[in-house]
Image (spheres, grey):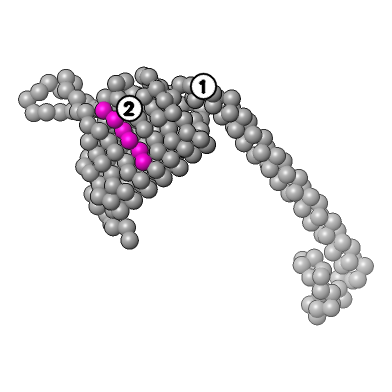
């Protein structure tokens, strides 16, 4: 308790405490508290330094792995732009030459792309999060510039479909999907075939987008509806 006032021994409260406890014992108590505090600070600094080193080492290993895999993706993909990265665990089913990635675009871990006879194009300066799924078995999926796609998003240009008086599982819907520039797609969003999302739109997490989204609108829900207009 006295240590709290150790920088101000002229205060009346400290003087009163020193008088009551005795100067010799009080100063010893203050000195002991100061030593313990310094020890705790040194321990905390040591732990912080170790964490900083481990953070640096983990980041270094991650970057090293990215650079080691870079030639493989450069050869495999139709295009991998300058500054773009494809992280560990990304899987492409079909011909990787049907996938094009612009500049400064990040494809994070465990993304799964099915291309078949379709085509997937990523623009510049964006990213697609962990565990995202894109199915372009037929049709094309085009993603513009400055697009942020959160983890676990699903985008389909090809999917099973239901038509009246038809056998379920025998028919499919194929239609191109277009995500224009400056779009934010929330986590867990599902975008179905034939959808075009206008520039500057935001799709809330967990939405199921079945129809076109107008530019600079915010949509959400199942199915997705307009929540607000961006201003």
* Quadrant (top left/top right/bottom left/bottom right) for the C terminus: bottom left
Look at the picture and state if 23 lies above or below 77.
below
Camera-nearest residue between 123 and 165: 123
Identify the element where label 2 is drawn. strand
Q: Where residue 62 sits in the image (x, y, percent)?
A: 59, 32
- For the residues labelled 2 and 1, say whether their Cβ atoms are less than 8 Å apart: no
Q: Is residue 174 visible?
A: yes
The residue at the far bottom in this view is 12
In magenta, the rendered stretch is 139-144
Give the mark nearer the N terminus: 2 vs 1: 1
Is residue 98 shown left or right of residue 68?
left
User: Which of the 4 image quadrants contains residue 178?
Assistant: top left
**In magenta segment, residue 140:** yes
Q: Where residue 11 sits in the image (x, y, percent)?
A: 80, 78
Q: Identify the residue at image location x=31%, y=33%.
A: 141
Residue behind mark 1:
72
**In magenta segment, residue 47:** no
Q: Where residue 19 sits in the image (x, y, percent)?
A: 87, 76
Residue behind mark 2:
119
Look at the picture and state if 222 lies above or below 132.
below
Q: Identify the residue at image location x=87%, y=61%.
A: 31
User: Which of the 4 image quadrants contains residue 158?
Assistant: top left
Chief secondary structure of the magenta portion = strand
Disc 1 crowd rating (10 Å Cα; few below 14, some 14-19, many 20+) is: few
Q: Where residue 72 sits in the image (x, y, percent)?
A: 51, 21
């Amino acid at each position: 308790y006295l240590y709290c006032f150790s920088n101000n021994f002229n205060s009346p409260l400290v003087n009163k405490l020193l008088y009551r406890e005795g100067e010799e014992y009080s100063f010893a108590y203050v000195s002991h508290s100061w030593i313990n505090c310094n020890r705790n600070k040194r321990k905390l600094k040591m732990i912080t330094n170790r964490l900083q080193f481990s953070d640096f080492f983990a980041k270094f290993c991650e970057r090293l792995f990215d650079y080691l895999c870079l030639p493989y993706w450069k050869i495999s993909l139709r295009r991998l732009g300058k500054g773009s990265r494809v992280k560990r665990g990304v899987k492409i089913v079909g011909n990787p030459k049907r996938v094009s990635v612009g500049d400064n675009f990040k494809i994070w871990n465990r993304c799964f792309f099915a291309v078949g006879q379709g085509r997937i194009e990523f623009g510049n300066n964006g990213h697609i999060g962990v565990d995202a799924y894109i199915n372009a078995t037929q049709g094309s999926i085009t993603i513009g510039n400055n697009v942020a796609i959160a983890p676990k998003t699903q985008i389909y240009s090809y999917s099973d479909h239901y038509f009246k008086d038809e056998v379920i599982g025998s028919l499919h819907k194929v239609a191109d999907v277009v995500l224009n520039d400056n779009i934010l797609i929330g986590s867990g969003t599902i975008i179905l075939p034939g959808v075009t999302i206008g520039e500057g739109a935001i799709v809330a997490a967990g939405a199921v987008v079945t129809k076109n989204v107008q530019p600079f609108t915010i949509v959400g829900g199942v199915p997705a509806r307009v929540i607000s207009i961006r201003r």
